[in-house]
Image: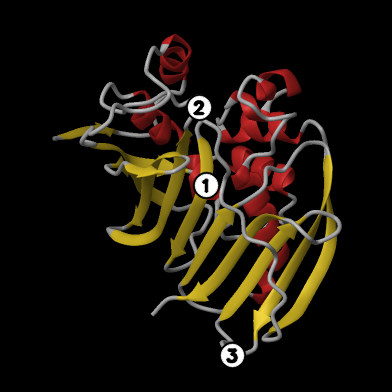
Amino acid sequence: MMFKQTHASLPSMVWPYCKVLSSRKPMLAADGLVMPSISVEAAKVRISAAHLRRYRDICGLSDAAVLPHAYLHVLAMPLHMRVFVHEAFPVKVLGLVHLRNVIRQWRPIHADAVLRLAVECSTLRETEIGQEYDLVTRAWQGGELVWEEVSTMLARRTAPGKRPSIERAQRDDLRMISEQVIHAAANTGRRYAFVSGDFNPIHLFDRTAQAFQFKQTVAHGMWSLARCIGLAEAAFPEGPIELDACFKLPIYLPGEFVFRSQRNEQDAGCVDLSLTTPKGDRLHLVVRCTTMS
């Protein structure tokens, strides 16, 4: 089964938020559910210079003529929300956890671009820790596909379970490019929420995060990804690239973290990024940047 909505431009976020607050959907889909295809499109999208400035500011990004690699994720948020609140989407959006994000960019996108954006969700995977949903976002300019993203969201099971974690590997084939400490203020989640439109309660206040089994406010994964990309993009290979990010331990706010970028000596077209605890022994985020043919 397939459901499709088409809008002339980006739709309002007001109605979807009303639907989120009144939703009676379950936290997990019923066993054996066949996920339908839900697609929402905006035919003509222009970028607000003011919104882009605010995004750069909260993510610590410098000004440039082209869009930051992860910016279209927040630009498409009204379409994401329309998918999440669609009657065919089986679970509550509140409390969904962002596990992984893959961005593919074929060429730089200028800030004055007029884009066609589309978001689709048609997958449901059962795992030990819950159900995974892939949200696919695509951007076209002049009929050419220029950007694509796959965001994997997790609806966690109520039964005890551990999120998969990978210890930071000590690899001889990686050469350090840069290393620095990142500070995240207590209000980072709220500031990013107003720019991104992602008001998931886990990002807003300690009390609302605790209602979803987190000890305190959690930073948005896409904020940490944008912050790391901004620090490393000068070392990225030229041409089309893929950024494959895995979100590991939650980033609690306020906090201090260590960012590292390293080059793979065996593959000049590969740069590895990581965000760890201050001791460097536990991972918050890992990103691999590779060239695409």
For the residue carrying disc 2, how many other residues have a C-alpha within 10 Å: few (<14), some (14-19), or many (20+)? few
Q: Position of residue 23 (x, y in %)?
A: 40, 13
Front residue of this view, candidates 113 and 188: 188
Residue 41 visible in the shown view: yes
Q: Nearer the viewer, mark 3 or mark 2?
A: 2
Q: Which of the image's four quarters has the N terminus?
A: top left
Horizontal side of 97 relative to 134 (left or right) equals: right
Q: Position of residue 125 (x, y in %)?
A: 33, 44
Q: Position of residue 30 (x, y in %)?
A: 29, 26
Of all residues, the one furthest to the bottom in this rendering is 266
Kind of element beneath mark 2: loop
- Report which quarter residue 188 is drawn in: top right
List the residue tagged with mark 1.
99
Tell me what residue is drawn at x 42 percent, y 20 percent: 16
Of all residues, the one furthest to the top in this rendering is 22
Amino acid type, label 1: Leu
- Distance from disc 3 to disc 2, alpha carbons, whole Å, reads 43 Å
List the residue tagged with mark 3.
266
| Mark 1 and mark 3 residues within 8 Å of each other at the beta carbon | no
Kind of element beneath mark 3: loop
Q: Earlier in the sequence, mark 3 or mark 2?
A: 2
Tell me what residue is drawn at x 68 percent, y 42 percent: 250
Front residue of this view, candidates 117 and 153: 153
For the residue carrying disc 1, how many other residues have a C-alpha within 10 Å: few (<14), some (14-19), or many (20+)? some
